[in-house]
Amino acid sequence: MPIREIQTKPYTDQKSGTAGLRKKVAVFQQPHYLENFLQSIFDTETTLRGKTLIIGGDGRYYNRDAIYTAIAMAAANGVAKVVVGQGGLLSTPAASHLIRLRGAGGGFLFTASHNPAGPDGDFGIKFNVAGGGQAPEGLTGRIYEHSKTIQRYRIVEGASLDLDRRGMQKLEDTEIEVVDCVDDYAALMQTLFDFDRLRDWFKKGHSLRFDAMHAVTGPYAQRILVEQLGAPQSTVMNGCPLEDFGGGHPDPNLIYAKHLVDLVNSPASPDLAAASDGDGDRNMILGRGIFISPGDSLAMLAAHLHRLPGYRDGLKGLARSMPTCRAVDQVAKALAVEFHETPTGWKFFANLLDAGRLTLCGEESFGTSSSHAREKDGLWAVLAWLNVLAATGLSVREIAQQHWQRFGRHYFARHDYENLSAATAATVMQALADATAHLPGKSYDDYTVALADDFSYRDPVDGSIAVNQGLRVVFGDSARIVLRQSGTGTEGATLRLYLERYESRETALAWETAEALAPLSNIADQIVRIGELTGRKAPSVVT
Ligand code: G1P
Ligand code: ZN
Protein backbone atom coordinates (compact mmCIF):
# COMPACT_ATOMS: atom_id res chain seq x y z
CA MET A 1 0.00 0.00 0.00
CA PRO A 2 1.60 3.24 -1.08
CA ILE A 3 2.09 6.25 1.14
CA ARG A 4 0.82 9.11 -0.96
CA GLU A 5 1.21 12.81 -0.73
CA ILE A 6 -2.04 14.47 -1.75
CA GLN A 7 -2.24 18.09 -2.87
CA THR A 8 -4.76 20.18 -0.97
CA LYS A 9 -5.93 23.76 -0.45
CA PRO A 10 -6.19 25.36 2.97
CA TYR A 11 -9.42 26.11 4.81
CA THR A 12 -9.51 29.23 6.91
CA ASP A 13 -11.82 28.13 9.72
CA GLN A 14 -9.89 25.38 11.51
CA LYS A 15 -9.53 27.29 14.75
CA SER A 16 -10.09 25.24 17.90
CA GLY A 17 -12.63 26.51 20.44
CA THR A 18 -13.09 25.78 24.14
CA ALA A 19 -12.64 22.05 23.51
CA GLY A 20 -11.16 21.25 20.11
CA LEU A 21 -12.39 21.80 16.57
CA ARG A 22 -16.16 21.45 16.41
CA LYS A 23 -18.23 21.85 13.22
CA LYS A 24 -21.27 20.51 11.45
CA VAL A 25 -20.73 17.03 10.00
CA ALA A 26 -21.15 18.52 6.51
CA VAL A 27 -18.21 20.84 7.14
CA PHE A 28 -15.98 17.90 8.08
CA GLN A 29 -17.17 16.04 4.98
CA GLN A 30 -15.83 18.71 2.61
CA PRO A 31 -12.97 17.41 0.46
CA HIS A 32 -9.75 17.09 2.49
CA TYR A 33 -11.19 19.07 5.44
CA LEU A 34 -10.45 16.43 8.08
CA GLU A 35 -7.17 15.47 6.42
CA ASN A 36 -5.97 19.08 6.41
CA PHE A 37 -6.61 19.45 10.12
CA LEU A 38 -4.98 16.14 11.03
CA GLN A 39 -1.94 16.89 8.86
CA SER A 40 -1.65 20.28 10.54
CA ILE A 41 -1.39 18.44 13.85
CA PHE A 42 1.25 16.03 12.52
CA ASP A 43 3.23 18.90 11.00
CA THR A 44 3.06 21.00 14.16
CA GLU A 45 3.45 18.36 16.86
CA THR A 46 6.36 16.56 15.16
CA THR A 47 7.10 14.60 18.34
CA LEU A 48 4.28 12.20 17.42
CA ARG A 49 6.66 10.57 14.96
CA GLY A 50 7.98 7.31 16.41
CA LYS A 51 5.49 7.44 19.29
CA THR A 52 2.21 5.81 20.24
CA LEU A 53 -1.02 7.61 19.35
CA ILE A 54 -4.35 6.86 21.07
CA ILE A 55 -7.46 7.14 18.88
CA GLY A 56 -11.12 6.85 19.81
CA GLY A 57 -14.40 8.67 19.73
CA ASP A 58 -17.87 8.92 21.15
CA GLY A 59 -19.38 6.73 18.43
CA ARG A 60 -21.35 9.45 16.71
CA TYR A 61 -22.08 9.58 12.98
CA TYR A 62 -18.83 9.90 10.94
CA ASN A 63 -16.74 8.51 13.84
CA ARG A 64 -15.64 5.39 11.99
CA ASP A 65 -14.84 7.17 8.73
CA ALA A 66 -12.77 9.74 10.57
CA ILE A 67 -10.91 7.07 12.54
CA TYR A 68 -9.99 5.08 9.41
CA THR A 69 -8.62 8.27 7.88
CA ALA A 70 -6.75 9.18 11.05
CA ILE A 71 -5.08 5.77 11.26
CA ALA A 72 -4.08 5.82 7.58
CA MET A 73 -2.59 9.27 8.09
CA ALA A 74 -0.84 8.31 11.32
CA ALA A 75 0.85 5.43 9.49
CA ALA A 76 1.93 7.78 6.71
CA ASN A 77 3.31 10.28 9.20
CA GLY A 78 5.64 7.95 11.03
CA VAL A 79 3.57 7.15 14.12
CA ALA A 80 5.01 3.90 15.54
CA LYS A 81 1.85 2.55 17.07
CA VAL A 82 -1.85 3.39 17.15
CA VAL A 83 -4.02 2.17 20.03
CA VAL A 84 -7.68 2.44 19.09
CA GLY A 85 -10.86 1.54 20.97
CA GLN A 86 -12.81 -1.38 19.55
CA GLY A 87 -15.48 -0.16 17.17
CA GLY A 88 -13.82 3.26 17.35
CA LEU A 89 -15.18 3.88 20.84
CA LEU A 90 -13.35 5.50 23.73
CA SER A 91 -14.92 7.85 26.22
CA THR A 92 -13.00 11.10 26.65
CA PRO A 93 -11.76 10.25 30.16
CA ALA A 94 -10.85 6.70 29.10
CA ALA A 95 -8.83 8.09 26.17
CA SER A 96 -7.07 10.53 28.49
CA HIS A 97 -6.23 7.64 30.81
CA LEU A 98 -4.95 5.46 27.95
CA ILE A 99 -2.60 8.23 26.80
CA ARG A 100 -1.13 8.30 30.28
CA LEU A 101 -1.10 4.53 30.75
CA ARG A 102 0.66 3.84 27.45
CA GLY A 103 3.04 6.81 27.69
CA ALA A 104 1.64 7.90 24.34
CA GLY A 105 2.74 11.00 22.44
CA GLY A 106 -0.88 12.11 22.28
CA GLY A 107 -4.37 11.20 21.21
CA PHE A 108 -7.12 12.07 18.77
CA LEU A 109 -10.57 12.17 20.39
CA PHE A 110 -13.37 12.32 17.86
CA THR A 111 -16.27 13.94 19.60
CA ALA A 112 -18.53 16.97 19.69
CA SER A 113 -19.32 16.18 23.33
CA HIS A 114 -23.01 16.70 24.09
CA ASN A 115 -23.93 18.31 20.77
CA PRO A 116 -26.52 16.36 18.75
CA ALA A 117 -25.20 13.86 16.20
CA GLY A 118 -26.21 12.41 12.84
CA PRO A 119 -25.72 13.61 9.25
CA ASP A 120 -27.16 17.02 10.16
CA GLY A 121 -25.53 17.13 13.57
CA ASP A 122 -22.09 18.04 14.82
CA PHE A 123 -18.70 16.42 14.69
CA GLY A 124 -15.43 17.35 16.29
CA ILE A 125 -11.88 16.46 17.11
CA LYS A 126 -9.81 17.16 20.15
CA PHE A 127 -6.07 16.73 20.09
CA ASN A 128 -4.71 15.68 23.48
CA VAL A 129 -1.02 15.81 24.24
CA ALA A 130 1.33 13.46 26.07
CA GLY A 131 0.16 13.56 29.67
CA GLY A 132 -3.46 13.15 28.58
CA GLY A 133 -4.73 16.73 28.61
CA GLN A 134 -6.13 18.82 25.77
CA ALA A 135 -3.61 20.71 23.70
CA PRO A 136 -2.92 24.08 25.29
CA GLU A 137 -3.97 27.27 23.53
CA GLY A 138 -0.47 28.05 22.26
CA LEU A 139 -0.32 24.72 20.43
CA THR A 140 -3.84 24.85 19.00
CA GLY A 141 -2.99 28.36 17.81
CA ARG A 142 0.07 27.06 15.94
CA ILE A 143 -1.97 24.21 14.43
CA TYR A 144 -4.54 26.76 13.24
CA GLU A 145 -1.85 28.97 11.69
CA HIS A 146 -0.42 25.95 9.88
CA SER A 147 -3.86 24.90 8.61
CA LYS A 148 -4.17 28.23 6.82
CA THR A 149 -1.17 27.49 4.59
CA ILE A 150 -1.23 23.72 4.22
CA GLN A 151 -0.56 22.44 0.68
CA ARG A 152 -0.39 18.64 1.04
CA TYR A 153 -1.13 15.78 3.38
CA ARG A 154 0.25 12.25 3.73
CA ILE A 155 -1.89 9.13 3.82
CA VAL A 156 -1.59 5.37 3.25
CA GLU A 157 -3.92 4.71 0.38
CA GLY A 158 -6.24 1.71 0.27
CA ALA A 159 -5.60 0.74 3.89
CA SER A 160 -7.68 -2.17 5.07
CA LEU A 161 -8.28 -2.41 8.80
CA ASP A 162 -10.77 -4.12 11.06
CA LEU A 163 -11.77 -1.81 13.89
CA ASP A 164 -14.01 -4.47 15.43
CA ARG A 165 -11.36 -7.16 15.91
CA ARG A 166 -9.36 -6.85 19.11
CA GLY A 167 -5.62 -7.42 18.87
CA MET A 168 -2.73 -6.42 16.65
CA GLN A 169 -2.80 -5.43 12.99
CA LYS A 170 -0.17 -3.78 10.86
CA LEU A 171 -0.32 -0.89 8.42
CA GLU A 172 3.00 -0.30 6.66
CA ASP A 173 5.45 0.04 9.57
CA THR A 174 2.79 1.08 12.07
CA GLU A 175 1.32 -1.33 14.61
CA ILE A 176 -2.40 -0.97 15.16
CA GLU A 177 -3.74 -2.34 18.44
CA VAL A 178 -7.51 -2.55 18.82
CA VAL A 179 -8.40 -2.60 22.53
CA ASP A 180 -11.52 -3.11 24.57
CA CYS A 181 -12.69 0.40 25.42
CA VAL A 182 -13.59 -0.35 29.05
CA ASP A 183 -10.85 -2.65 30.47
CA ASP A 184 -8.19 -0.12 31.46
CA TYR A 185 -10.66 2.48 32.61
CA ALA A 186 -12.51 -0.01 34.82
CA ALA A 187 -9.20 -1.14 36.33
CA LEU A 188 -8.38 2.48 37.17
CA MET A 189 -11.76 2.98 38.86
CA GLN A 190 -11.07 -0.03 41.07
CA THR A 191 -7.96 1.66 42.42
CA LEU A 192 -9.92 4.80 43.35
CA PHE A 193 -13.13 3.50 44.87
CA ASP A 194 -14.18 0.89 47.40
CA PHE A 195 -15.81 -1.65 45.10
CA ASP A 196 -16.58 -4.08 47.96
CA ARG A 197 -18.45 -1.41 49.83
CA LEU A 198 -20.34 -0.40 46.69
CA ARG A 199 -21.36 -4.00 46.00
CA ASP A 200 -22.62 -4.15 49.52
CA TRP A 201 -24.54 -0.91 49.09
CA PHE A 202 -26.41 -2.36 46.13
CA LYS A 203 -26.92 -5.66 47.94
CA LYS A 204 -28.62 -3.83 50.78
CA GLY A 205 -31.22 -2.69 48.28
CA HIS A 206 -29.99 0.83 47.55
CA SER A 207 -30.60 1.95 44.03
CA LEU A 208 -29.07 3.99 41.23
CA ARG A 209 -30.48 5.00 37.87
CA PHE A 210 -27.85 5.97 35.32
CA ASP A 211 -28.78 7.36 31.92
CA ALA A 212 -26.09 6.83 29.28
CA MET A 213 -28.26 8.72 26.78
CA HIS A 214 -27.42 6.28 23.95
CA ALA A 215 -23.90 7.65 23.98
CA VAL A 216 -20.46 6.32 24.81
CA THR A 217 -20.82 5.57 28.54
CA GLY A 218 -23.27 2.69 27.94
CA PRO A 219 -20.60 -0.05 27.80
CA TYR A 220 -18.71 1.49 30.72
CA ALA A 221 -21.79 1.67 32.92
CA GLN A 222 -22.85 -1.85 31.97
CA ARG A 223 -19.46 -3.32 32.86
CA ILE A 224 -18.74 -1.35 36.01
CA LEU A 225 -22.16 -0.81 37.56
CA VAL A 226 -23.95 -3.98 36.51
CA GLU A 227 -21.24 -6.61 36.00
CA GLN A 228 -18.67 -5.50 38.57
CA LEU A 229 -20.81 -3.86 41.25
CA GLY A 230 -23.83 -6.12 40.93
CA ALA A 231 -26.40 -3.39 40.34
CA PRO A 232 -29.57 -4.66 38.67
CA GLN A 233 -29.76 -4.40 34.88
CA SER A 234 -32.48 -1.77 35.18
CA THR A 235 -29.85 0.60 36.66
CA VAL A 236 -28.55 1.54 33.21
CA MET A 237 -30.91 3.36 30.85
CA ASN A 238 -30.24 3.93 27.16
CA GLY A 239 -27.04 1.91 27.44
CA CYS A 240 -26.57 1.14 23.77
CA PRO A 241 -24.41 3.72 21.95
CA LEU A 242 -26.08 4.88 18.72
CA GLU A 243 -24.65 6.97 15.88
CA ASP A 244 -27.34 9.60 16.33
CA PHE A 245 -27.67 9.16 20.13
CA GLY A 246 -31.21 7.97 19.47
CA GLY A 247 -32.08 11.39 18.08
CA GLY A 248 -31.58 12.88 21.53
CA HIS A 249 -29.44 15.61 22.94
CA PRO A 250 -26.97 13.86 25.25
CA ASP A 251 -26.40 16.81 27.52
CA PRO A 252 -27.10 15.84 31.13
CA ASN A 253 -28.85 18.85 32.57
CA LEU A 254 -32.26 19.96 33.84
CA ILE A 255 -33.59 20.38 30.31
CA TYR A 256 -32.28 17.39 28.37
CA ALA A 257 -32.44 14.96 31.29
CA LYS A 258 -35.74 16.24 32.63
CA HIS A 259 -37.06 12.68 32.84
CA LEU A 260 -34.53 12.10 35.65
CA VAL A 261 -35.75 15.19 37.46
CA ASP A 262 -39.30 13.85 37.17
CA LEU A 263 -38.12 10.45 38.36
CA VAL A 264 -36.47 11.76 41.54
CA ASN A 265 -39.58 13.76 42.29
CA SER A 266 -41.75 10.65 42.09
CA PRO A 267 -42.27 7.80 44.59
CA ALA A 268 -40.15 5.59 42.31
CA SER A 269 -37.04 7.69 42.92
CA PRO A 270 -33.77 5.80 43.28
CA ASP A 271 -31.27 6.85 45.98
CA LEU A 272 -29.07 8.36 43.29
CA ALA A 273 -29.92 9.31 39.72
CA ALA A 274 -27.25 10.37 37.26
CA ALA A 275 -26.48 10.87 33.60
CA SER A 276 -23.49 11.45 31.39
CA ASP A 277 -23.05 13.10 27.99
CA GLY A 278 -22.06 12.11 24.45
CA ASP A 279 -18.38 11.46 25.16
CA GLY A 280 -18.71 10.56 28.84
CA ASP A 281 -16.99 13.52 30.45
CA ARG A 282 -20.02 15.28 31.93
CA ASN A 283 -22.18 14.21 34.86
CA MET A 284 -25.46 15.16 36.45
CA ILE A 285 -26.26 14.17 40.04
CA LEU A 286 -29.69 13.94 41.65
CA GLY A 287 -31.00 12.40 44.84
CA ARG A 288 -34.50 11.71 46.08
CA GLY A 289 -36.32 14.99 45.45
CA ILE A 290 -33.12 16.99 44.97
CA PHE A 291 -30.84 18.20 42.16
CA ILE A 292 -27.23 18.85 43.07
CA SER A 293 -25.86 21.70 41.00
CA PRO A 294 -22.43 20.96 39.53
CA GLY A 295 -20.79 23.68 41.63
CA ASP A 296 -22.31 22.17 44.76
CA SER A 297 -21.35 18.66 43.66
CA LEU A 298 -17.74 19.78 43.33
CA ALA A 299 -17.78 21.36 46.79
CA MET A 300 -19.52 18.40 48.42
CA LEU A 301 -17.14 15.88 46.86
CA ALA A 302 -14.23 18.05 47.98
CA ALA A 303 -15.50 17.90 51.54
CA HIS A 304 -15.85 14.10 51.49
CA LEU A 305 -13.13 12.92 49.12
CA HIS A 306 -10.73 11.83 51.87
CA ARG A 307 -13.19 9.01 52.67
CA LEU A 308 -12.54 7.32 49.32
CA PRO A 309 -9.65 4.84 48.97
CA GLY A 310 -7.84 6.66 46.17
CA TYR A 311 -7.82 9.93 48.10
CA ARG A 312 -6.99 8.95 51.67
CA ASP A 313 -3.85 11.10 51.61
CA GLY A 314 -6.03 14.19 51.44
CA LEU A 315 -6.35 16.95 48.89
CA LYS A 316 -3.38 18.65 47.28
CA GLY A 317 -5.47 21.43 45.84
CA LEU A 318 -8.86 22.42 44.47
CA ALA A 319 -9.86 24.43 41.41
CA ARG A 320 -12.89 25.61 39.49
CA SER A 321 -13.44 27.53 36.29
CA MET A 322 -14.21 31.20 36.77
CA PRO A 323 -17.99 31.12 36.06
CA THR A 324 -18.49 28.12 38.37
CA CYS A 325 -20.06 29.12 41.70
CA ARG A 326 -17.74 29.74 44.60
CA ALA A 327 -18.99 26.89 46.82
CA VAL A 328 -15.73 24.98 46.51
CA ASP A 329 -13.79 28.09 47.58
CA GLN A 330 -15.33 27.72 51.02
CA VAL A 331 -14.17 24.12 51.30
CA ALA A 332 -10.65 25.03 50.16
CA LYS A 333 -10.56 27.70 52.84
CA ALA A 334 -11.83 25.36 55.55
CA LEU A 335 -9.38 22.63 54.61
CA ALA A 336 -6.56 25.14 54.06
CA VAL A 337 -5.63 23.69 50.67
CA GLU A 338 -4.27 25.40 47.57
CA PHE A 339 -7.01 26.85 45.40
CA HIS A 340 -7.20 28.11 41.80
CA GLU A 341 -9.74 29.92 39.65
CA THR A 342 -9.10 29.15 35.98
CA PRO A 343 -10.71 30.16 32.67
CA THR A 344 -13.51 28.04 31.20
CA GLY A 345 -12.31 24.80 29.58
CA TRP A 346 -10.70 21.73 31.09
CA LYS A 347 -7.36 22.37 29.41
CA PHE A 348 -6.62 25.11 31.94
CA PHE A 349 -6.47 22.55 34.78
CA ALA A 350 -3.88 20.38 33.04
CA ASN A 351 -0.67 22.13 34.10
CA LEU A 352 -1.74 22.29 37.74
CA LEU A 353 -2.72 18.62 37.67
CA ASP A 354 0.60 17.69 36.03
CA ALA A 355 2.45 19.68 38.67
CA GLY A 356 0.70 17.69 41.42
CA ARG A 357 -1.01 20.82 42.74
CA LEU A 358 -4.64 19.73 42.25
CA THR A 359 -6.61 16.70 43.36
CA LEU A 360 -10.11 17.76 42.36
CA CYS A 361 -11.48 20.33 39.94
CA GLY A 362 -14.72 21.18 38.23
CA GLU A 363 -16.87 23.41 36.07
CA GLU A 364 -20.46 24.55 36.31
CA SER A 365 -21.11 22.89 32.95
CA PHE A 366 -21.59 19.51 34.63
CA GLY A 367 -17.88 18.67 34.72
CA THR A 368 -16.00 17.17 37.64
CA SER A 369 -12.84 15.12 37.80
CA SER A 370 -9.73 14.40 39.77
CA SER A 371 -6.02 13.93 39.21
CA HIS A 372 -6.65 10.38 37.92
CA ALA A 373 -7.15 11.82 34.39
CA ARG A 374 -6.64 15.04 32.48
CA GLU A 375 -10.25 15.31 31.35
CA LYS A 376 -13.47 15.62 33.24
CA ASP A 377 -15.02 12.27 33.96
CA GLY A 378 -18.75 11.59 34.16
CA LEU A 379 -18.73 8.04 35.47
CA TRP A 380 -15.97 8.89 37.94
CA ALA A 381 -18.27 11.51 39.48
CA VAL A 382 -21.13 9.01 39.74
CA LEU A 383 -18.87 6.43 41.41
CA ALA A 384 -17.49 9.11 43.73
CA TRP A 385 -21.01 10.06 44.83
CA LEU A 386 -21.98 6.40 45.26
CA ASN A 387 -18.89 5.85 47.37
CA VAL A 388 -19.65 8.91 49.51
CA LEU A 389 -23.21 7.66 50.07
CA ALA A 390 -21.96 4.18 50.94
CA ALA A 391 -19.19 5.47 53.23
CA THR A 392 -21.32 7.97 55.15
CA GLY A 393 -24.62 6.12 55.17
CA LEU A 394 -26.27 9.45 54.36
CA SER A 395 -28.71 10.27 51.57
CA VAL A 396 -27.93 12.80 48.85
CA ARG A 397 -30.25 15.27 50.54
CA GLU A 398 -28.59 14.81 53.92
CA ILE A 399 -25.15 15.34 52.40
CA ALA A 400 -26.39 18.55 50.79
CA GLN A 401 -28.14 19.86 53.90
CA GLN A 402 -25.16 19.18 56.15
CA HIS A 403 -22.91 20.89 53.62
CA TRP A 404 -25.04 24.02 53.40
CA GLN A 405 -25.32 24.19 57.19
CA ARG A 406 -21.59 24.19 57.48
CA PHE A 407 -20.50 26.26 54.48
CA GLY A 408 -23.58 28.21 53.42
CA ARG A 409 -25.28 27.80 50.05
CA HIS A 410 -24.48 29.19 46.60
CA TYR A 411 -27.57 29.46 44.43
CA PHE A 412 -26.50 29.28 40.80
CA ALA A 413 -27.98 29.32 37.32
CA ARG A 414 -26.71 29.73 33.79
CA HIS A 415 -28.87 31.48 31.21
CA ASP A 416 -27.91 30.67 27.61
CA TYR A 417 -28.94 32.89 24.72
CA GLU A 418 -28.38 30.72 21.67
CA ASN A 419 -28.22 31.40 17.96
CA LEU A 420 -27.56 35.11 18.16
CA SER A 421 -25.82 36.83 15.29
CA ALA A 422 -22.12 37.37 15.88
CA ALA A 423 -22.72 41.12 15.72
CA THR A 424 -25.45 41.06 18.38
CA ALA A 425 -23.35 38.93 20.72
CA ALA A 426 -20.43 41.30 20.24
CA THR A 427 -22.64 44.31 20.99
CA VAL A 428 -23.78 42.82 24.31
CA MET A 429 -20.23 41.89 25.31
CA GLN A 430 -18.93 45.31 24.34
CA ALA A 431 -21.67 47.15 26.21
CA LEU A 432 -20.81 45.37 29.44
CA ALA A 433 -17.07 45.69 28.83
CA ASP A 434 -17.54 49.45 28.43
CA ALA A 435 -19.59 49.61 31.62
CA THR A 436 -17.14 47.75 33.86
CA ALA A 437 -14.97 50.80 34.53
CA HIS A 438 -17.89 52.67 36.09
CA LEU A 439 -19.55 49.82 37.99
CA PRO A 440 -17.42 49.45 41.14
CA GLY A 441 -19.07 51.19 44.08
CA LYS A 442 -22.53 51.23 42.49
CA SER A 443 -25.35 49.67 44.49
CA TYR A 444 -28.30 47.64 43.27
CA ASP A 445 -30.80 46.75 46.00
CA ASP A 446 -28.70 45.17 48.76
CA TYR A 447 -25.74 44.53 46.52
CA THR A 448 -22.75 46.76 45.87
CA VAL A 449 -20.31 46.12 43.05
CA ALA A 450 -16.86 45.42 44.48
CA LEU A 451 -15.14 44.45 41.24
CA ALA A 452 -15.98 44.49 37.53
CA ASP A 453 -13.49 43.33 34.95
CA ASP A 454 -12.59 41.11 32.03
CA PHE A 455 -11.14 37.95 33.56
CA SER A 456 -7.61 37.05 32.61
CA TYR A 457 -5.45 34.26 33.93
CA ARG A 458 -1.78 33.67 34.36
CA ASP A 459 -0.98 29.98 34.48
CA PRO A 460 1.02 29.52 37.69
CA VAL A 461 3.02 26.65 36.18
CA ASP A 462 4.18 27.89 32.78
CA GLY A 463 3.36 31.59 33.11
CA SER A 464 1.19 31.66 29.97
CA ILE A 465 -1.51 34.31 29.94
CA ALA A 466 -5.10 33.91 28.75
CA VAL A 467 -7.06 37.13 28.28
CA ASN A 468 -10.72 37.92 27.51
CA GLN A 469 -11.98 34.95 29.49
CA GLY A 470 -15.33 36.45 30.50
CA LEU A 471 -16.74 39.63 32.03
CA ARG A 472 -17.53 39.49 35.72
CA VAL A 473 -19.39 41.77 38.05
CA VAL A 474 -18.65 40.79 41.63
CA PHE A 475 -20.70 41.90 44.62
CA GLY A 476 -18.15 40.78 47.21
CA ASP A 477 -18.83 37.29 48.52
CA SER A 478 -22.61 37.79 48.25
CA ALA A 479 -23.20 37.51 44.52
CA ARG A 480 -21.71 37.53 41.05
CA ILE A 481 -22.87 38.06 37.50
CA VAL A 482 -20.67 36.67 34.72
CA LEU A 483 -21.05 37.01 30.97
CA ARG A 484 -19.07 35.18 28.32
CA GLN A 485 -19.41 33.93 24.81
CA SER A 486 -19.48 30.17 24.19
CA GLY A 487 -16.57 28.64 22.32
CA THR A 488 -18.14 25.29 21.47
CA GLY A 489 -21.16 26.12 19.31
CA THR A 490 -21.40 25.41 15.61
CA GLU A 491 -24.29 27.70 14.73
CA GLY A 492 -24.45 31.44 15.37
CA ALA A 493 -23.19 32.85 18.64
CA THR A 494 -24.22 31.83 22.15
CA LEU A 495 -23.99 34.11 25.17
CA ARG A 496 -23.89 32.64 28.64
CA LEU A 497 -25.03 34.67 31.62
CA TYR A 498 -24.10 33.15 34.97
CA LEU A 499 -25.86 34.17 38.19
CA GLU A 500 -24.62 33.29 41.65
CA ARG A 501 -25.92 34.25 45.08
CA TYR A 502 -24.49 33.22 48.43
CA GLU A 503 -26.56 32.79 51.59
CA SER A 504 -25.40 31.53 54.97
CA ARG A 505 -28.47 32.49 57.03
CA GLU A 506 -30.17 29.44 58.50
CA THR A 507 -33.51 30.53 57.05
CA ALA A 508 -32.11 30.98 53.54
CA LEU A 509 -30.72 27.53 52.85
CA ALA A 510 -33.77 25.81 51.35
CA TRP A 511 -35.08 28.23 48.75
CA GLU A 512 -36.00 27.38 45.20
CA THR A 513 -33.06 28.34 43.00
CA ALA A 514 -35.11 30.40 40.54
CA GLU A 515 -36.71 32.37 43.36
CA ALA A 516 -33.43 32.90 45.14
CA LEU A 517 -31.92 34.27 41.95
CA ALA A 518 -34.85 36.42 40.82
CA PRO A 519 -33.52 39.66 42.41
CA LEU A 520 -30.11 39.08 40.88
CA SER A 521 -31.66 38.36 37.53
CA ASN A 522 -33.35 41.78 37.69
CA ILE A 523 -30.04 43.41 38.51
CA ALA A 524 -28.44 41.60 35.56
CA ASP A 525 -31.17 43.04 33.33
CA GLN A 526 -30.13 46.52 34.38
CA ILE A 527 -26.39 45.98 34.12
CA VAL A 528 -26.01 43.59 31.17
CA ARG A 529 -29.19 44.62 29.29
CA ILE A 530 -29.18 41.35 27.40
CA GLY A 531 -32.94 41.33 26.73
CA GLU A 532 -32.91 44.91 25.57
CA LEU A 533 -29.87 44.50 23.29
CA THR A 534 -30.84 41.14 21.79
CA GLY A 535 -34.61 41.58 21.63
CA ARG A 536 -34.96 38.23 23.39
CA LYS A 537 -37.62 38.02 26.07
CA ALA A 538 -36.04 35.03 27.79
CA PRO A 539 -32.98 32.82 27.61
CA SER A 540 -33.06 29.81 25.25
CA VAL A 541 -31.98 27.42 28.01
CA VAL A 542 -31.59 27.74 31.77
CA THR A 543 -29.40 25.18 33.52
C1 G1P B 1 -18.69 24.63 27.36
C2 G1P B 1 -18.67 24.80 28.86
C3 G1P B 1 -17.27 24.61 29.40
C4 G1P B 1 -16.75 23.24 28.96
C5 G1P B 1 -16.88 23.09 27.46
C6 G1P B 1 -16.50 21.68 27.00
O1 G1P B 1 -17.88 25.59 26.75
O2 G1P B 1 -19.17 26.06 29.23
O3 G1P B 1 -17.28 24.71 30.80
O4 G1P B 1 -15.42 23.07 29.35
O5 G1P B 1 -18.22 23.34 27.04
O6 G1P B 1 -17.33 20.70 27.55
P1 G1P B 1 -18.44 26.95 26.11
O7 G1P B 1 -19.44 26.56 25.08
O8 G1P B 1 -19.09 27.70 27.23
O9 G1P B 1 -17.24 27.66 25.56
ZN1 ZN C 1 -18.49 16.02 26.79
Image: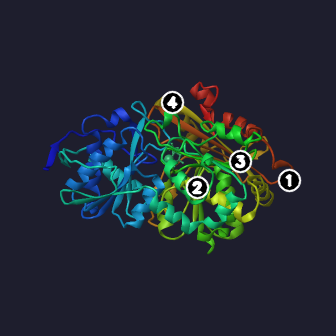
Q: Is residue 248 above or below residue 278?
A: above
Q: Residue at x 34, y 39 (%)?
A: 13
Q: Residue at x 60, y 65 (%)?
A: 193
Residue found at the far right of this picture:
507
> Can you see residue 142?
yes
Q: In the rendered image, which residue does mark 2 sit on?
A: 225
Q: Earlier in the sequence, mark 2 or mark 1?
A: 2
Q: CA distance from mark 3 to mark 1?
A: 28 Å
364 or 493, nearer to the observer = 364
Q: Residue at x 22, y 45 (%)?
A: 150
Q: In the rendered image, which residue does mark 4 sit on?
A: 419
> Can you see residue 464?
no
Q: Earlier in the sequence, mark 3 or mark 1?
A: 3
Q: CA distance from mark 4 to mark 1?
A: 41 Å
Circles 4 and 1: CB distance less than 8 Å? no
Q: Position of residue 325 (x, y in %)?
A: 65, 51
Circles 2 and 3: CB distance less than 8 Å? no
Q: Earlier in the sequence, mark 2 or mark 4?
A: 2
Q: CA distance from mark 2 to mark 3?
A: 15 Å
Q: In the rendered image, which residue does mark 3 sit on?
A: 270
Q: Secondary structure at mark 4?
A: strand
